[in-house]
Image: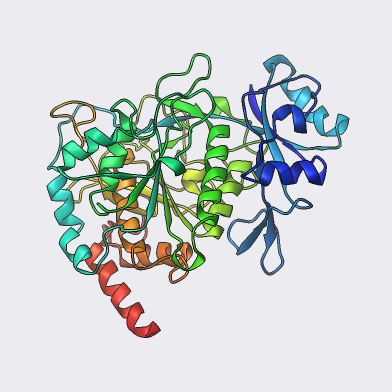
Amino acid sequence: MRVLIQLRPSPDLVAAVADPDRTATTADVADGLPGVELDTAFTPVALPRPVPAAGGDPLSLNQPLDFSLAAEDASVLVRGTISDDELAARVTLLPTLRPDVVGVFSDPVIESAPTCGGDGPVGDWHDVERLLNVPGLHAEGLDGTGVALAVLDTGINAAHTARQLGRGVTLDAERCWSPSGVTGRPGEFEVDHGTMCAFDTLLAAPQATLIDIPLLLSTRPGGSAMDGLLSDAVSAFAHLRNVLDAQPAASRALVVNNSWGSFSPEWDFPVGHPGNYSDNAAHPFNLMVAALDRAGADVLFAAGNCGRDCRDARCAYSTRPIVGANSHPKALSIGGVDVNGDRVGYSSQGPGRLTARKPDVCAYTHFSGSGAFGAGEPDSGTSAAAPVAAGLVAAVRTRWPASRLSPAQLRALLRRTAEDRSEVGFDYDYGYGTLDPAGIIAALQRRAKSMA
């Protein structure tokens, strides 16, 4: 089983790992662990320590937390493999045999979330632009200018995206990042799932600057072309923390789209095990999500395609399929509706595992758009709904950086203004409802007047 191992080496090594201008190797921080085959191709990642802002439990993600990367606070993550027949014993023994081992966590496979079924598209991307009230957004100066928008997926083909949109696409090659072993230039990957996501983010935020992170171009043995390992997502989020920290505090704006998730408990430790991912707020990746939110980023995840009406064949969770970071209280979990406002049958329903009230809201999917999968094939799944929502968030960030409107405040605004799709307010089918750009604009106008 692939695992993430949390270590606390000497402070000088922690500082070297945390410094983006220095490079520390696995051999530097772990000179061998009993029963573990360490992955020397994986660059160690500094894990910030969560510190309750006002006392309380540091592993509760429902309270304000600060995150410290100071050498005396942070720890270090490395990646390795433990034989399945020794797994239970090694996970138990490692912290006992090595006092620098803090914990051993699952490193589950993560996969993109395309649609199930073969239904044709419902409407096209111009319908989505209309429903997003793009002219109204742009009239308010909300078009994504100056906003960094990271797409963590299979890589972006910027030329194809530009042709489909009929306009230019801005990509910041210097801030892009790839997992170890992934070759290819930013913005020049094969047209696939990631290109669809990039296209859909730019519907509401055409002037946003894309950051290409081909997270799902796995090099693991036996992996498909559209899955990866959660450990690479940990590294990607660490990179994005550096991107965010380099931005001026007054104009900090980073939107992170994740149209992927973990589909099967077979790749995870059981619920209740300290190394579990699906239900464990203390898993390193779940902490990284909270840390990036605290630093000022907006993090969005697709709710997944495990809805009861049309489950993806890979869905192996018998209940509560919105797991791990896709159900994180500091992230927006996005369900899917078509352009008629009807929930698509594959959109996963709550409750979520880290927090019950998931999905948060719904956005549009299953429309003709990017052409990433061929003529006549829709942009589909909650994989398309999430970047549609991410583009809307990026549009808002044009004039409302995190210094003026925190990620938590923006999440609350989106939920409060959503168009309710039921008679009871929040429900597990639609969350708080479908995103309502006109309501968002009105709420921002009122907020601007109150701050004047």
Q: Give residue 122's quadrant in the image.
A: top left
Picture coordinates of residue 230 (x, y %)?
A: 54, 33
- The residue shown at (74%, 17%) is 86
Residue 176 vs residue 352, the one in the foreground: 176
Picture coordinates of residue 234 (x, y %)?
A: 57, 39
Residue 387 visible (yes or no):
yes
Q: Is residue 184 left or right of residue 99?
A: left
Please give the count of numbered marks on the rendered protein. 0
Vertical arrangement, residue 27 with respect to residue 288, above or below: above
Residue 325 vs residue 314, the one in the foreground: 325
Q: Is residue 127 left or right of residue 172?
A: left
Vertical arrangement, residue 114 with respect to residue 47, above or below: above
Indicate the quadrant containing the C terminus: top left, top right, bottom left or bottom right: bottom left
Indicate the quadrant containing the N terminus: top left, top right, bottom left or bottom right: top right
Picture coordinates of residue 201 (x, y %)?
A: 29, 47
Residue 329 visible (yes or no):
no
Q: Is residue 262 left or right of residue 371?
A: right
Q: Is residue 166 left or right of residue 52?
A: left
Residue 62 vs residue 377, the one in the foreground: 377
- The residue shown at (18%, 65%) is 136
